[in-house]
């Protein structure tokens, strides 16, 4: 089955990364097409692809359009049941689906205060109480999954749940957010994935810096490979 995936800039688009990882982590072939977020042509580029108002979007071989990362995840997990996108165990599978849905709908304070940025990390970022509450929730939810699985990923081997939490790992690293040793090990496992390293390198080579993501007056630093 031939898939086309519309993405935004790799350095900044967290939802594009989630959509891409739903393919790349499981060796599902896909052709990438790009739209430039915050450009005057962005909306027209998405419409021309057949998407809604944002990225990612996927076109299947029969012309069906998937307009959201969650629909992409569910479609691929059903289309490729032997690729391990979700755990085989029923209880673990349900918990993975819970975590995916919670990421899709929640953690707004963390996402708003700490935009994903694979070009730059920041020194002395001070998280708000709301961000700390989101981090506490992550510690509880991801920590429970990691304790049960033994790591390094949420359910042992990578699943779509890890694809959805990859931008969280990037935010923790890029903003120096305070997390437990268990969650730090998870962040490092995510950052070490070749597909994430390749995504970052492509963004550094291709993307222009977008001022919307500037966190001045915070001092910039090199994005860390490990924390």
Image (cartoon, helix red, strand yellow):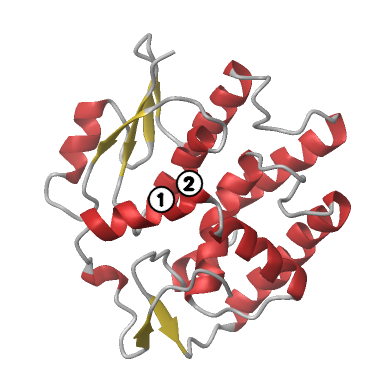
Identify the element where label 2 is drawn.
helix
Q: Position of residue 79 (x, y in %)?
A: 58, 17
Image quarter of residue 180: bottom right
Relative to 39, is 54 on the left or the right?
right
Q: Badge 1 local density, few (<14 within 10 Å), some, or many (20+)?
A: few
Q: Quadrant of the C terminus?
A: bottom right
Tell which of 210 and 50 is nearer to you: 210
Q: Quadrant of the N terminus?
A: top left
Relative to 211, is 213 on the left or the right?
right
Q: How many marks?
A: 2
Tell which of 46 and 190 is nearer to you: 190
Would you name the residue on which mark 2 appears?
195
In the depicted structure, whether residue 122 falls above or below residue 15: below
Of all residues shown, which one is farthest toward the left? 40
Q: Are the residues flagged by discs 1 and 2 in contact, CB closer than 8 Å?
A: yes
In the depicted structure, whether residue 52 falls above or below residue 102: above
Q: Position of residue 5 (x, y in %)?
A: 35, 31
Image quarter of residue 118: bottom left
Q: Residue at x 39, y 50 (%)?
A: 199
Q: Position of residue 179 (x, y in %)?
A: 68, 76
Q: Residue at x 28, y 25 (%)?
A: 50
Would you name the residue on which mark 1 appears?
198
Q: Badge 2 local density, few (<14 within 10 Å), some, or many (20+)?
A: some
Relative to 22, is 45 on the left or the right?
left
Identify the element where label 1 is drawn.
helix
Please give the label number shown on residue 79.
none
Q: Residue at x 21, y 48 (%)?
A: 36
Mark pair 1, 2: CA separation: 5 Å
Q: Position of residue 78 (x, y in %)?
A: 62, 19
Q: Residue at x 73, y 54 (%)?
A: 152
């Amino acid at each position: 089955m031939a898939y086309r995936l519309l993405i935004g800039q790799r350095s900044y688009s967290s939802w594009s990364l989630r959509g891409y990882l739903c393919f790349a982590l499981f060796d599902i072939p896909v052709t990438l097409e790009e739209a430039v977020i915050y450009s005057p042509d962005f909306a027209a580029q998405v419409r021309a692809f057949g998407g809604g108002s944002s990225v990612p979007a996927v076109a299947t071989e029969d012309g069906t359009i998937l307009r959201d990362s969650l629909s992409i995840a569910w479609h691929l997990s059903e289309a490729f049941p032997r690729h391990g996108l979700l755990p085989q165990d029923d209880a673990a599978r349900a918990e993975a689906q819970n975590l995916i849905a919670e990421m899709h709908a929640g953690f707004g304070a963390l996402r708003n205060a700490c935009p994903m940025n694979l070009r730059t990390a920041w020194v002395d970022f001070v998280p708000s109480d709301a961000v700390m509450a989101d981090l506490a929730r992550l510690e509880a939810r991801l920590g429970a999954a990691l304790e049960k699985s033994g790591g390094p990923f949420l359910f042992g081997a990578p699943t779509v749940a890890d694809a959805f939490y990859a931008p969280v790992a990037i935010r923790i690293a890029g903003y120096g957010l305070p997390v437990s040793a268990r969650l730090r090990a998870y962040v490092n496992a995510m950052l070490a994935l070749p597909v994430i390293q390749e995504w970052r390198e492509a963004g550094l080579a291709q993307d222009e810096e977008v001022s919307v993501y500037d966190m001045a007056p915070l001092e910039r630093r090199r994005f860390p490979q490990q924390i």
